[in-house]
Image (cartoon, helix red, strand yellow):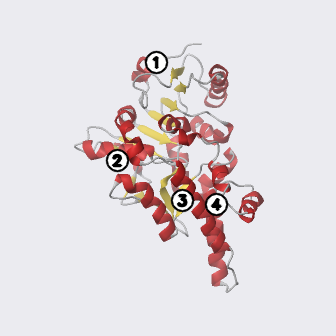
Amino acid sequence: MKLYKWKDIKKHLNQNLLLGNGASMAIDKRFSYRSLYQEVSKALSKELRGLFGHYDSTNFEFILRLLLETNQVNKILNIEDDKTERYYHELRGALMNTIRNIHPSYDEVKDHFDKITKFLCRFNKVMSLNYDLLVYWAMLTYNDENGQWFKDCFVDGKFEKDFRFLSNPQPPAKGATLVFYPHGSLFLATKPFGGEVKLSSTEKDYLLNSVLAKWEQEDYIPLFVSEGTSQEKLRSITRNSYLNTVYDLVLAEHTDSLVTYGWSFGDQDQHILTALARGKLKKIAISVYTEDDDWKSHLDSVKDKVKQTLRIYEPNIYPFDAKSEGCWIY
């Protein structure tokens, strides 16, 4: 089975990059947990776990919004209610504490940012399926020194739906890479009654604490979809303007090539493959983590999905070593 080195294929693949959880795990093993919901649920009351079960959901954004809006309706109708607000704060607190324990600090990961941005800046678009702040921190650090090369398409804190003009270089930067989050991110939130907002901080190393503080102080609801089946994730995406725009206009845009890094092509992300298929890709590069014993059989399974869903066949499928020189943090 042919396995390429990144240096041997990179010149042919510079349009789109899709990052999965394996990219975050390469930087910090704390991201290797199987389920954020399972981590959070350890601190939840049986009533809250029952609420997730009733709606057959592991989506924090959905349950938080449900509790908050129910509480507001009850207040307006003068219905006595001391539970929904309490459960809302319980869930939000458990989520915040879990993320605080799992997520590395800026100082713990900053040494990787130079290699990350050298890898990312060769692409026209980067799409990260991860909710963490690693890519965001890296691009902020790069932009501080090189001008606005990386752009998340938020202008004055609001998402610019007509984002394509932002691909024009903005001096002193000599190029541009647009960065999107199809499943949301920690630094994105929704207001209690709709509308997404970008949470920021003047200090990069304080950003994580700033985000968590704003969740608590201003009732922002975190905008990221880290759990659930493909169908459940898609329902969450279609409910939000930012996520829906990224799904319809970014993932499905007609482009020639795609590189995937750290993405398992799991069934829970079938909606991502379906959207990519609308873009009629011609070639794809797939990172392979060869330290897994079953990497060959996993790669065969991924190739089958690529052929069936994306209609890309050999020799336009390029498996490459995830730890080869010049790729991600290597």
Give how far across and how far down residue 242 sits, in percent.
51, 54
Q: The N terminus appears in which quarter of the rendering?
A: top right
Task: Report the Cα–Cα distance between label 2 and label 4.
Answer: 29 Å
Whichever of callouts 2 and 4 sits on the residue coming sooner in the sequence is 4
Residue sitting at x 45%, y 48%: 133
Going by the numbered disc 1, the residue's amino acid type is Lys
Residue 51 drawn at (x, y percent): 73, 63
Mark 4 or mark 3, earlier in chain? 4
Observer able to see residue 149: no
Residue located beneath label 1 in the image:
5
Amino acid type, residue under disc 3 in the picture: Pro
Q: Are marks 4 and 1 in contact (CB under 8 Å)?
A: no
Between the C-alphas of marks 2 and 3, the distance is 21 Å
Q: Which residue is mark 3?
A: 222
Residue, disc 4: 62
The amino acid at mark 2 is Leu
Q: Residues within 10 Å of mark 1 (few under 14, many from 20)?
A: some
Residue at horizontal 59 percent and vertical 40 percent from the top: 275
Residue 200 image offset from top left, x and y in percent: 39, 58
Task: Identify the mark nearer the N-term, 1 or 2.
Answer: 1
